[in-house]
Structures are given as C-alpha cells and as structure tokens.
C-alpha cells in the first residue's frame, strides 16, 4: 500500500501574505533569490520574446488568476475578432499571456500536474469536481462546460501567441509544494523547470516583463 499523500491546504497558497504578494506582482518575496542559472537563461529568453513581437496589433493578457480558462477564450477571441473585423492573418496579431500567481503551474506539462498533484495544490478541478491530474489549459480548457480545443495553449501557440512564465513565482511555489510533500525544494524546482511547455518562455519576474511590454507599446488587458 502506498503511503497517503500529505494533504495540501489551499490557504497555505492563497491566504498567506507572501503568496498574496506573488499572486499580485509576480515578485519573488524571500530572503534568498532565484537560482542564478535560471535567471540568466530567463533574461536571454526575455530579450528574444520581446523582440519577436513585431505584429501591428499586439496585446498582453495579464492573467494572475485561472478564471476557469476565460483568459484563453479572450485570446482566441482577440485573434478571431481581428480576422473578422479587418481580414487579418495570424501574423498580423501578437497575443501575450502571463502565467504567475494562480496560473503559474499552467505553464507546466501534464507530468508535473500528475506527479505533484498540482490540481489539488491550486484547487483546479474538472467538471466532476476532481482535482486535475493534467494541465487543463494545454490542449482543451473547459469553459462553460465545453472543451475548447481552439483555445488550448498548444493551438494558440501554433497561431503565434506568446506565453510567459514567471521564474520568481515558479521558484517560490515549487518550494511550497516541496515543503508540503517533504521534498527538496531545489530538486522540485529543477524538475518543474525542465517540464515547462514548449510554447512557454520563462522570464525572471512578471512584474518586469509586463512593464517592458508596456514600454514597448503593447496594449494591456487585465484578466
């Protein structure tokens, strides 16, 4: 018989002041700092993702909370509305989506959701009320009781959408998962970082990424 998995209480993640700050700002609130190698790679990635946003129509969708997948529906609507209104191609449109706070783990592959019980951790549940054991946004997010494959991360990424994952939030929340499971924080972080979805770019701090996007003239849509 396998030992019972330690129960994770939602307040550990959503009610503490530290996590609340991460949810709101994407800033790393701790006495330490994120791993240097990760920060260095993320800095390079940030320069690349920002430079690649060269379409005439650009919008950043700031999603710190899951909202039952509504953010991805809004991104899909952004592409489709521009196509209908001005007969534009996908190459004329750049959508940027942020993953931090309550959406941090949506930037990870299914294996991480199953291995660490991330559906339970973030209280993300399927239509039957069971915690997700796969990333619900990767292929077909469930919205209003319907599976919306056109709004999945894989499909939107194929159309050119950019997805950003906050390294600060990932580092902190990986540490919280590790603490709750009795695991090594650095090992859990490394595991999660190695399983970031291919459509997702790791950035050092979401609060800085959003600021840089604004400085570059990218429209902002709070989710």
Image (tube, rainbow, N blue to C red):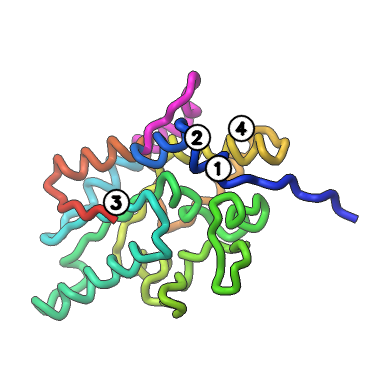
Q: Quadrant of the N terminus?
A: bottom right
Callout 4 environment at 10 Å: few (<14), some (14 to 19), or many (20+)? some
The quadrant holding residue 75 is bottom left
Report the residue at 17% width, 57% height from top: 58
Q: From the image, tell me which residue sits under label 1.
A: 11
The answer to whether marks 4 and 1 mark residues whose Cβ atoms lie closer than 8 Å is no
Q: CA distance from mark 3 to mark 1?
A: 23 Å
Q: CA distance from mark 2 to mark 4?
A: 22 Å
Q: Of helix, strand and loop, which one carries label 1?
A: helix
Q: Of helix, strand and loop, which one carries label 2?
A: loop
The disc at residue 186 is 4
User: Which sits earlier in the primary sequence, circle 4 or circle 3?
Assistant: 3
Residue 193 image offset from top left, x and y in percent: 53, 44
User: Which sits earlier in the primary sequence, circle 2 or circle 4?
Assistant: 2
Report the residue at 76% width, 49% height from top: 5
Residue 149 shown left or right of residue 212 in the figure: right
Q: From the image, tell me which residue sits under label 3.
A: 62
Residue 53, compared with residue 19, is above or below; it is below
The disc at residue 16 is 2
Callout 1 environment at 10 Å: few (<14), some (14 to 19), or many (20+)? few
Residue 217 image offset from top left, x and y in percent: 12, 47
Residue sitting farthest toward the right: 1
Q: Of helix, strand and loop, which one carries label 3?
A: strand
- Does the magenta segment cover residue 93? no
Residue 41 image offset from top left, x and y in percent: 41, 36
User: Which sits earlier in the primary sequence, circle 4 or circle 1?
Assistant: 1
Please give the range of residues in magenta: 26-43
The answer to whether marks 2 and 4 mark residues whose Cβ atoms lie closer than 8 Å is no
């Amino acid at each position: 018989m396998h030992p019972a998995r330690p129960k994770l209480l939602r307040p550990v993640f959503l009610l503490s002041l530290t996590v609340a700050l991460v949810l709101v700002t994407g800033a790393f609130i701790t006495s330490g700092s994120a791993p240097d190698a990760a920060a260095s790679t993320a800095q390079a990635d940030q320069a690349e993702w920002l430079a690649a946003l060269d379409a005439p129509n650009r919008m950043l969708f700031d999603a710190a909370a899951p909202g039952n997948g509504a953010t991805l529906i809004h991104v899909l609507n952004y592409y489709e509305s521009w196509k209908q209104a001005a007969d534009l191609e996908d190459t004329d449109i750049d959508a940027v989506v942020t993953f931090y706070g309550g959406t941090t783990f949506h930037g990870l592959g299914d294996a991480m959701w199953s291995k660490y019980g991330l559906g339970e951790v973030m209280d993300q549940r399927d239509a039957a009320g069971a915690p997700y054991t796969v990333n619900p946004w990767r292929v077909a997010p469930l919205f209003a009781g319907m599976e919306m494959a056109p709004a999945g991360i894989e499909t939107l990424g194929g159309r050119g959408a950019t997805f950003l994952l906050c390294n600060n939030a990932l580092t902190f929340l990986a540490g919280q998962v590790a603490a709750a499971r009795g695991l090594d924080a650095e090992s859990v972080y490394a595991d999660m970082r190695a399983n970031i979805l291919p459509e997702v770019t790791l950035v050092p701090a979401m609060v800085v990424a959003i600021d840089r996007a604004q400085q570059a003239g990218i429209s902002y849509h709070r989710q």
